[in-house]
Amino acid sequence: MRDNNTARRQMYAAGILFLLLLAWALHRGPVLSAEAAVYDAITRQLLNNTMAGRQALAGSLWWPPLPVLLRVPCMLLPGAGAWSSILVSCAAAAGIALLFWRSLSRWGLRRAWPLWLAAALALPFFGAAAADGSRRTIVMLLVLWSGGSLLDWTQTRRMRALVYLALALAGLAGVDAALWPWTMLVLILAIADLLLRAEPRARKEGAAIVLVMPWLYGFGVWLLVNWLIMGDPLYFLRSLPLLTAGNDATLLPDPPAHAIAAAVMMTGGFLLAVLDRRRGELLLNATGIILLLTMLWLNGFGRGLPLQAGWDAAAMLAILAMAHIAAREAETQKTGLRSIAAALAVTALLLITWRDPAGQQDFFHGPQQDLNNGRLVLHTIERHVRARSQYPAVMLCGYEALPLIAARGTPDMFVPWIDPDLARFAVDYHGHNLYLLIPHPENTAQFESIHWKYPGLFNYGTTGTLYEGDWHGWRLYEWLQPRR
């Protein structure tokens, strides 16, 4: 009965936190990140049953489908509108608090657990991510769920913990492409731990199947949807070669200071776990170290990948690992230097995060200004094109064009083009003067299908195109057609 009452109180507290975060977001106004604006536009297109919406749902590794699917029920709520992304991010933030509280209570941190929970929620990027509608809170929640479930499975061998671990890793694969290497490495780590244990072979095989199946099932569904919608099951993976053949600009050239602090904390926790021969704690810290190494490796590509969610999740995971050290010390009835050191490390992490601007930086910085600039660009291009033609059609290539088109309201001369096909361009829009508007190949826009299907189009054009000009990150070509 006591456990049921505790769980009920935790759920109520998470609900109150959700309402508080939502009230804060309402007070700020619907200031969405650029990422959230794109996902909102995809969801609207999908609910309107447009071809662009269906293609955008599954056609890119860098815009995974799970954030869209999470927004669909919120978008259907009366009056939700632009708040669907904020509802999702606030719900994920409340889930983080609930997961922390349950873990701390289960580990036996009696009087100190409110301080550890407050430390996690006091990280400045936590509130910012909850209120801007981005997927960062979803990534943090799933990373913490993965790490906590791996620890529980190692210590208790309960099948529920293994199922949670498998679901969290599969969910991460559908939320953030940058976390794909990490999910596979954690799967390998969990399976290796499973094989090294003296357990019956049938139990090992069953556990391995439970671990791998959700990840494989999600990947298989993604392949199937690409085959049904795009006509190519590997369509969403075609941009991967651009990782080694793009521009060299990075948005985050160095890891933020809080990621370095998290690396120090989890390396210390890993060494303590080795000395004490505690396998669960070792694996928890190992997952955090692997996460940071994965982000550092991807950052080395220099391709402008959105890595901020990974850095932030690592800091959250470091606090969870330090809390487990303190709980273990409390369990052995020790005041403990280790417990004091863990608390000081978390305090240092908080101070570093609050003092370091990178700790509060979002990958999509200045979203509202970017969206306003985009609207101004479309207005300028519209005047330019209408001065030359009475019946123009401008094809906007890429995902970042979707919120710009949505902001214009009624359908007009600008048409979203997720899967460009130049061979059918003139046929589908016969009688119009045709134009191509292509995003500059930088950051996530460099992985758009227009760049890997027609590699030289942006820089040199192609047969039948005429360069018109550049406007704030967009390049316009006219598609010349023979007279009939």
Image (cartoon, rainbow, N blue to C red):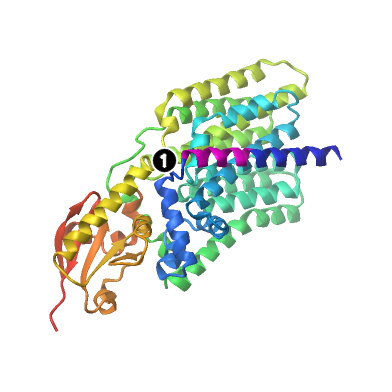
Indicate whether residue 27 is drawn in magenta. Answer: yes
- Determine which quarter of the picture holds residue 479: bottom left
Within 10 Å of the Cα at label 1, are there few (<14), some (14-19), or many (20+) other Cα atoms? few
Residue 300 image position (x, y, % from top left): 36, 40
Magenta stretch, overall SS? helix
Q: Amino acid at mark 1?
A: Trp
Instruction: Please say whether residue 374 is visible from this viewpoint.
Output: yes
Residue stretch rendered in magenta on the structure: 17-28
In the image, residue 102 lies in the stretch drawn in magenta: no
The residue tagged 1 is 297
| Residue in view at x 48 percent, y 60 percent | 43
Secondary structure under tag 1 reads helix
Horizontal placement of 434 versus 331: left or right? left
| In front of the other: 390 or 256 | 390
Q: Relative to residue 190, is residue 68 depicted above or below?
A: below
Horizontal arrangement in the rendering, residue 90 relative to residue 475 (left or right): right
- Residue located 76% across and 40% down the image: 7
Q: Position of residue 347 (x, y in %)?
A: 56, 21
Q: Is residue 130 above or below residue 392?
A: above
In the rendering, at what x and y percent does residue 246 appear? 29, 50
55 left or right of 192 in image: left
